[in-house]
Image (tube, rainbow, N blue to C red):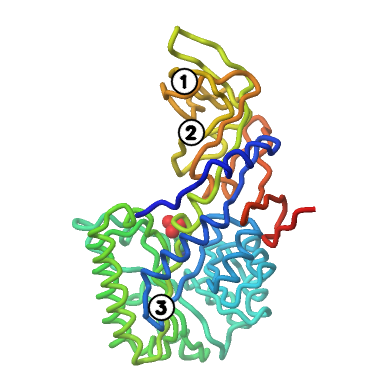
Amino acid sequence: MKYPKVNKDFFEDILKVETPAIVYNLNILDEIVAMLERDIGFCSNLFLSFSLKANRNVGINKFLATKGLGADVASMEELKVAIKSNYRNIYCHAPGFGKKEIEYVYNHNLIFDFNTLSQVVQSLETIRGKYIGLRVKVPFDTSKSESYCELSRFGIDLQKCPKEVFYENNLVISHIHVHTGEKNIEDFEHTLDFLKSELEHNTLLKNTEVVNLGGGITRLYLEEKELETFWGMVKKFAEDVKKRGIKVILEPGMLLTMISGFLITQVVTSDLITENLNNVIMDSSRFNLFQWGNTRPLYTTSKNISVKHNVFGPSCYENDIFAKKTPLPRLEVGDKLVLSSAGAYVVSMQRTLHGIQGPKEYIYYNNYLDQGDKYELSRN
Ligand SMILES: Cc1ncc(COP(=O)(O)O)c(C=O)c1O
């Protein structure tokens, strides 16, 4: 994957914000969307959605909505952000939704992807005679597959589920949805074969209009060869189901927004432990913020000569550490540091150990920087 270039002016601009802060660079996000659109090419029934579990910032989501992406939501909060952001297509699959939330989904003219049979049964009053979606469980061979297989708690097993519930209540299954974690070629091939066979033989699925293939494509973007194979498979599948008028969706989260986010944090204490090792404590916590992804220092206000640094968060947790023995211009109290990869699964899943406040969020677009939920930025 070719990383978008970030110029020095951008770093100088964002170092002016009060810390801790996260700045989302929409120009970078734009480049990632363009890269994915290039990869999709001329496949007219293949579409992208953004998985809001990665980022619920309204500025980011309004921007992605104007780019024509759909939204994948899994909670009431995410659904409300998706509606506010004016996404045209919202796909909703929430394992934790009960009767009331599902009624809310249908009241907004959306179709819900049911995760379990009991979710279907308790909502019959709302969905009788309507279109519904199903998240389906892909039967993997446990001995060969890296995926959760039948141990996964997500999705309905099409072989075991009683068809009468659907027929007797005139439920039309128009959407099917799979997500098997971070994708690998072998398991994905098996998933597509399974879907093709079900679409061909399972009468319950004869009205399918949308097949959602889930997210989890970040790792593939690190392997050029695998990536080519992956897109070849997706496009072939989309071409095969096109004759039936079926739309295919991919719904990445991490890949879309991860590298567009930058954490800006300030040095609170700075102590030389040896001549060449400086221990610094910052005003934001790695433990609280980076539960899933990795991050690394990119830029600093310090113009000192370089020494190795241990860069810690402010919590009492021993392993609250951003960088270990990493060469950086010697950081002093008050210096600021920019860290990478803060655009996905950072604010959306931050912890609050000690009640430490999370970063404020800012949007940067075409040299303008602003706080809040808009991306049409103006310089007053
Ligand atoms: C159903 C579903 N779709 C999409 C995603 C997004 O995955 P990623 O952010 O890895 O692309 C997830 C992540 O957990 C998911 O559970």
Please identify the residue farthest to the left as the structure is shown.
144
Element type where label 3 sits in the image: strand
Query: Is 269 situated above or below 255?
Result: above
Q: Position of residue 330 (x, y in %)?
A: 52, 19
Q: CA distance from mark 3 to mark 1?
A: 46 Å
Helix, strand or loop under label 2 = strand
Q: Amino acid at mark 3?
A: Leu
The residue pinned by badge 3 equals 46
Q: Residue at x 35, y 54 (%)?
A: 1
Please tell me whether mark 3 or mark 2 is closer to you in this view: 2
Looking at the image, is mark 2 or mark 1 earlier in the sequence?
2
Task: Report x, y in % for residue 182.
Answer: 36, 56
- Calculate the distance from the C-alpha at mark 3 to the C-alpha at mark 2: 37 Å
Q: Nearer the viewer, residue 57 or 182?
A: 57
Q: 303 or 335: nearer the eye?
A: 303
Write the residue at 40% across / 86% down: 246
Q: Which mark is residue 297?
A: 2
Is label 1 in a helix, a strand or a loop? strand
- For marks 3 and 2 on the same chain, the one whose residue lies earlier in the sequence: 3
Residues at badges 3 and 2 in contact (C-beta under 8 Å)?
A: no
Label 3: few (<14), some or many (≥20) within 10 Å? many
- Tag 1 residue: 309
Label 1, ligand 1: CB separation under 8 Å: no
Q: Earlier in the sequence, mark 3 or mark 1?
A: 3
Q: Tell me which image quadrant ligand 1 sits in.
A: bottom left
Type of the residue with mark 2 = Pro
Q: CA distance from mark 2 to mark 1?
A: 11 Å
Callout 2 touching callout 1 (CB < 8 Å): yes
The local crowd at label 2, few if under 14, some if 14 to 19, many if 20 or more residues have their Cα within 10 Å, is some
Question: What amino acid type is highlighted by mark number 1?
Answer: His
